[in-house]
Image: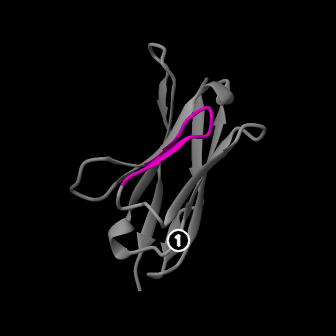
Amino acid sequence: QVQLVESGGGLVQPGGSLRLSCAASGIIFRLYGMGWYRQAPGKQRELVATITVTGSTNYAESAKGRFTVSRDNAKKTAYLQMNSLKPEDTAVYYCNAQRARPGSNYWGQGTQVTVSS
């Protein structure tokens, strides 16, 4: 059974930082590209950042320069370091694991990030 479990969300003041973690089980983690997405109330889910199996990264424009995605294959965990947080970063953040094989696209349950003073 595949599980992606996010953690690290919470309430933070503008300008603050959070580090999200996504712990994977039930998959060969090193074979999967990992991604972070977010969904704010009333909005569609959007890409935040991705990291490939080789460590190449990609960021949404809103995340560039502030967020850093990383992975630790030994720990089967992906991370999203978020700095200089803004109120518009408030959303539920979801972890995604996928590979180029039918049926190999998995989502976590999400973790709430709220940026407010």
Instruction: Looking at this view, name the residue that lies furthest to the right.
Output: 74
Q: Which residue is mark 1?
A: 83
The answer to which quarter of the image holds residue 78 is top right
Q: Is residue 58 left or right of residue 8?
A: left
Residue shown at 62%/33% (left/top)?
A: 54
Instruction: Looking at this view, name the residue that lies furthest to the bottom.
Output: 117
Residue shown at 23%/54% (left/top)?
A: 43
Instruction: Looking at this view, name the residue that lies furthest to the top.
Output: 102
> What segment is highlighted magenta in the picture?
49-60
Residue shown at 32%/70% (left/top)?
A: 88
- Name the amino acid, label 1: Asn
Q: Is residue 90 left or right of residue 43?
A: right
- Give x and y (percent) for residue 31: 63, 24
Relative depth, front residue between 49 and 12 = 49
Quadrant of the rendering where the N terminus is positioned:
top right
- Give x and y (percent) for residue 87: 35, 75
Q: Is residue 51 magenta?
A: yes
Residue 109: tell me if it is visible: no
Task: Identify the secondary structure beneath mark 1.
Answer: loop
- Give x and y (percent) for residue 111: 49, 55
Q: Is residue 68 left or right of residue 110?
A: right
Quadrant of the rendering where the C terminus is positioned:
bottom left
Crowding around mark 1 (Cα neighbors within 10 Å: few <14, some 14 to 19, many 20+) is: some
